[in-house]
Image (spheres, rainbow, N blue to C red):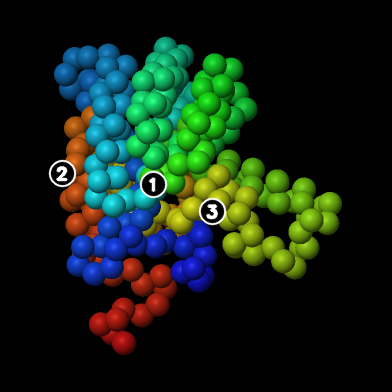
């Protein structure tokens, strides 16, 4: 895949201080953080929002251009209704409280995932946030909400199939790049770096197409305790790795 393609991972800077252009984060561990302190799970999610605010600010300051965070998966509907409602409430609070500031700071907000099934008030807030920040370009915050990687790919295939059926796309023209243009992250570079907190070592159905060549970093820290220090540590690990994209290592050439 050409590095000029919008979906190809791309570093913001070259050399020893390489900063990934796009970081994806699986924000995990809110419930365990709360349990360890004898608090309800909702309290962990509230502290998780504070960690998100810190991370958005730090990412922008160090030169990251895109940040995609896993906020609510399609599988999270299986959780108790009270917890699901609390997560919806936190998204509403985050948008209402932070939208004005993020807009002024040049942050563009995208909410990726299925819109079907979301409560009307949530859907309206999401549309408002996207509409009011649509012209911003300094930093892109993608919030994956009601998102599942397999569902996203299936949804993209359905949309592409419709265009093929009506003649807008020829079957022989279908390629990886064409399919990628139907994903929620179309026109964005793929993540250079994926970080997961809480000591779990799996992708949990997050950005399955997009992280094919991403560097993966896993930390034991629980998400509410994540801060700039951890973000910079992840970037340092990323910077020390050689990304080959299937080619031979430069040291072996």
Please, what secondary structure does the residue beneath circle 3 have? loop
Callout 3 crowding tier (Cα within 10 Å): few <14, some 14–19, many ≥20: some
Of badges 1 and 2, nearer the viewer stands 1
Q: Nearer the viewer, residue 144 or 212?
A: 144
| As drawn, 119 above or below 4 | above
Image position, residue 37 (x, y; %):
16, 19
| Direction from residue 143 to residue 11 in the image, left or right | left
Residue corresponding to mark 3: 187
- Are the residues tagged 1 and 2 within 8 Å (C-beta)? no
**Picture residue at 50% right of the left edge, 41% below the top:** 135
The numbered dot on residue 138 is: 1
* Quadrant in which the C terminus appears: bottom left
State the separation of the CA atoms marked 1 and 3: 15 Å
Closer to the chain start, of discs 2 and 3, is 3
Of badges 2 and 3, nearer the viewer stands 3
Please, what secondary structure does the residue beneath circle 2 have? helix
Image position, residue 48 (x, y; %):
28, 27
Q: Nearer the viewer, residue 55 or 170?
A: 55
Image position, residue 201 (x, y; %):
31, 46
Image position, residue 240 (x, y; %):
21, 65
Please, which residue is most extreme toward the bottom here? 253
Quadrant of the image occupied by residue 230: top left
**Picture residue at 24% right of the left edge, 50% below the top:** 62
Closer to the chain start, of discs 1 and 3, is 1
Closer to the chain start, of discs 1 and 2, is 1
Residue corresponding to mark 2: 229
């Amino acid at each position: 895949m050409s590095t000029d393609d919008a979906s190809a991972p791309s570093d913001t800077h070259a050399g020893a201080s390489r900063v990934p252009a796009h970081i994806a984060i699986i924000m995990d561990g809110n419930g365990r953080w709360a349990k360890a302190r004898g608090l309800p799970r909702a309290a962990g999610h509230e502290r998780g929002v504070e960690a998100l605010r810190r991370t958005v600010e730090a990412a922008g300051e160090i030169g990251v251009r895109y940040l995609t965070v896993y906020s609510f998966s399609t599988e999270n509907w299986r959780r108790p209704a009270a917890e699901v409602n609390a997560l919806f409430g936190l998204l509403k609070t985050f948008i209402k409280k932070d939208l004005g500031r993020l807009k002024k700071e040049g942050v563009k907000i995208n909410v990726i995932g299925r819109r079907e099934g979301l409560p009307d008030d949530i859907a309206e807030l999401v549309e408002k946030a996207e509409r009011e920040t649509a012209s911003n370009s300094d930093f892109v915050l993608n919030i994956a909400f009601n998102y599942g990687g397999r569902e996203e790919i299936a949804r993209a295939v359905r949309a592409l199939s419709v265009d093929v059926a009506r003649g807008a796309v020829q079957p022989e023209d279908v390629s990886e790049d064409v399919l990628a243009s139907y994903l929620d992250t179309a026109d964005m570079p793929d993540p250079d770096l994926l970080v997961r907190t809480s000591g779990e070592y799996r992708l949990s159905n997050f950005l399955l197409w997009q992280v094919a060549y991403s560097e993966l970093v896993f930390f034991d820290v629980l998400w509410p305790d994540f801060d700039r220090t951890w973000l910079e540590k992840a970037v340092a690990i990323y910077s020390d790795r050689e990304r080959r994209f299937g080619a031979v290592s430069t040291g072996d050439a």
